[in-house]
C-alpha cells in the first residue's frame, strides 16, 4: 500500500490543520485525540511517512524507532500517568479498525481502563 500524504495526521504534521500539542521533538509529534475515549487520550505519531505499525517497524530507522519509544515513555512520565497506569495501543489494519493511515500510538489514561479488550465474537 502507498502512503497517502493527504491523511489527517500528515496534514497536522504539515501544519495545515491544528492540533492540541502535548510534545514534539525531532522524530515525534504528540497531541490530544479530537474525540477522547478516556479522560486522557493522547496520540503519538512519527514525523516520517509510515502508514501503520507494520510499515514503521519494517522501514523506520533505528533512531526513529528508539526516538518514538523514548518519546512515548517521556510523555507518560511528563503527564503524570505512570503512578496510576495507562494503556498504549496501535490499531493496525482492517481487523483493528485503523482509521487514519499514518502510524499512531494511542495513550489511554485517567481512569480504570478495565481488562485488555472486550471479548470479540469468535
Ligand atoms: P485509529 O482508529 O486509526 O486507531 O484512531 C484514529 C484516531 O484519530 C481516533 O481516535 C480519532 O478520534 C483521531 N482523530 C481523527 N481525526 C483527528 C483530528 O483531526 N485531530 C485529532 N487530534 N485526532 C483525530
Image (spheres, rainbow, N blue to C red):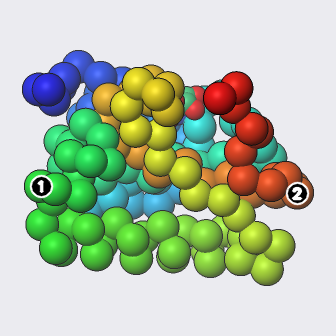
Q: Secondary structure at mark 1?
A: helix
Mark 2 and mark 1 lie on one chain; the one further toward the N terminus is 1
Image check: 96 left or right of 6?
Answer: right
Give the residue displayed 38% in from the left and 60% down from the top.
Answer: 24
Within 10 Å of disc 2 (Cα), the crowding (few <14, some 14-19, many 20+) is: few
Q: Which mark is residue 59?
A: 1
Regarding residue 16, the answer to whether it shows in the image is no
Question: Residue 110 at x, y = what percent?
Answer: 82, 57
Q: Residue furthest front?
A: 122
Picture quarter containing residue 38?
Answer: top right
Q: CA distance from mark 2 to mark 1?
A: 35 Å
Regarding residue 38, the answer to whether it shows in the image is yes
Give the residue displayed 32% in from the left and 49% down from the top.
Answer: 53
Question: Quadrant location of the N terminus?
Answer: top left
Within 10 Å of disc 1 (Cα), the crowding (few <14, some 14-19, many 20+) is: few
Image check: 71 left or right of 60?
Answer: right
Decide: marks 2, 1 in contact (CB < 8 A)? no
Picture quarter containing residue 87?
Answer: bottom right
Q: Which mark is residue 112?
A: 2
Q: Residue furthest right?
A: 112
Question: Residue 90 at x, y = what percent?
Answer: 47, 47
Image check: 76 left or right of 43?
Answer: right
Give whichever of 24, 68 is nearer the camera.
68
Give the residue displayed 62% in from the left and 77% down from the top.
Answer: 77
Question: Quadrant location of the C terminus?
Answer: top right
Q: Secondary structure at mark 2?
A: loop
Q: Residue furthest top?
A: 6
Give whichever of 119, 46 is nearer the camera.
119
Compared to residue 79, the image places residue 118 above or below, namely above
Give the residue displayed 23% in from the left and 52% down from the top.
Answer: 56
Give whichever of 55, 48 is nearer the camera.
55
Compared to residue 115, the image places residue 55 above or below, namely above
Amino acid at each position: 500500500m502507498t502512503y497517502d500524504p493527504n491523511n489527517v495526521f500528515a496534514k497536522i504534521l504539515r501544519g495545515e490543520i491544528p492540533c492540541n500539542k502535548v510534545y514534539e521533538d525531532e522524530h515525534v509529534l504528540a497531541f490530544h485525540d479530537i474525540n477522547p475515549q478516556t479522560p486522557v487520550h493522547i496520540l503519538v505519531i512519527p514525523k516520517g511517512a509510515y502508514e501503520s505499525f507494520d510499515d514503521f517497524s519494517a522501514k523506520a530507522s533505528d533512531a526513529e524507532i528508539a526516538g518514538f519509544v523514548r518519546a512515548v515513555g517521556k510523555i507518560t512520565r511528563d503527564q503524570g500517568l505512570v503512578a496510576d497506569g495507562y494503556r498504549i495501543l496501535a490499531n493496525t489494519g482492517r481487523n483493528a479498525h485503523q482509521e487514519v493511515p499514518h502510524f499512531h500510538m494511542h495513550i489511554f489514561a485517567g481512569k480504570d481502563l478495565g481488562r485488555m479488550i472486550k471479548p470479540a465474537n469468535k
